[in-house]
Image (spheres, helix red, strand yellow):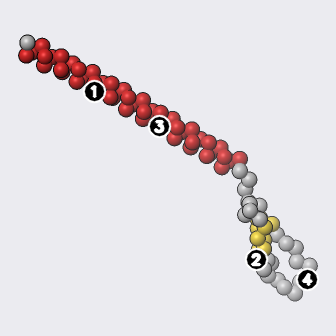
Amino acid sequence: MQSIRSLLLTAAGIAFMLMALVFTASLGLALAGIAAVLFAGSTIYARLSPKPVRATANRASGLDRREPRIWNDGRGTIIDL
C-alpha cells in the first residue's frame, strides 16, 4: 500500500510539473510574440515618420558672410541668427 501511494504521488507531482512547464512556456511565447509585434511596429513607424529637413536662407548682402542656421525639427522652424 505504501509503494502504491508513493507511486501515485510521484505521478501526480510529475504531471503537475509538466503542466506548470507547459503553462510557463506558453506564457513566455506569448510575451515574446507581443514584444516582437511592438518592436516591428516601432520599426515601421520610425521608417514612415517624416525626417527633419534642413533649410537654408540666401543672403542678399555680401557684407555679412556668416550664414544663419535655419532648420526644421518637425515641430517648427528654428532660426539661429
Count residues near mark 2 (Cα–Cα under 10 Å), then give few for <14, some for 14-19, many for 20+: few
Earlier-in-chain disc, 3 versus 2: 3
Task: Report the Cα–Cα distance between label 3 and label 1.
Answer: 21 Å
Task: Please state, as top left, top right, bottom left or bottom right, where the N terminus lies in the image.
Answer: top left
- Whether the residues at callouts 2 and 4 have beta carbons within 8 Å, the answer is no
Disc number lying in front (1 or 2): 1
Report the amino acid beneath label 4. Answer: Ser
Residue drawn at point x = 71 percent, y = 50 percent: 49
Task: Report the Cα–Cα distance between label 4 and label 3.
Answer: 62 Å
Task: Report the Cα–Cα distance between label 4 and label 1.
Answer: 82 Å
- Whether the residues at callouts 3 and 1 have beta carbons within 8 Å, the answer is no
| Residue 62, horizontal then vertical, whole percent | 89, 83
Count residues near mark 3 (Cα–Cα under 10 Å), then give few for <14, some for 14-19, many for 20+: few
Report the amino acid beneath label 1. Answer: Met
Count residues near mark 4 (Cα–Cα under 10 Å), then give few for <14, some for 14-19, many for 20+: few
Which type of secondary structure does the marked residue at label 4 adopt? loop
Residue drawn at point x = 7 percent, y = 16 percent: 2
Earlier-in-chain disc, 4 versus 3: 3
Report the amino acid beneath label 2. Answer: Asp
Earlier-in-chain disc, 3 versus 1: 1
Report the amino acid beneath label 3. Answer: Leu
Q: Is residue 2 above or below residue 27?
A: above
Q: Residue at label 3?
A: 31
Q: Residue at label 2?
A: 80
| Residue furthest to the bottom | 63
Which type of secondary structure does the marked residue at label 3 adopt? helix
Task: Report the Cα–Cα distance between label 1 and label 2.
Answer: 66 Å
| Residue 81, horizontal then vertical, whole percent | 78, 80
Q: Nearer the viewer, residue 71 or 8?
A: 8
Disc number lying in front (2 or 4): 2
Q: Residue at label 1?
A: 17
Residue drawn at point x = 87 percent, y = 87 percent: 63
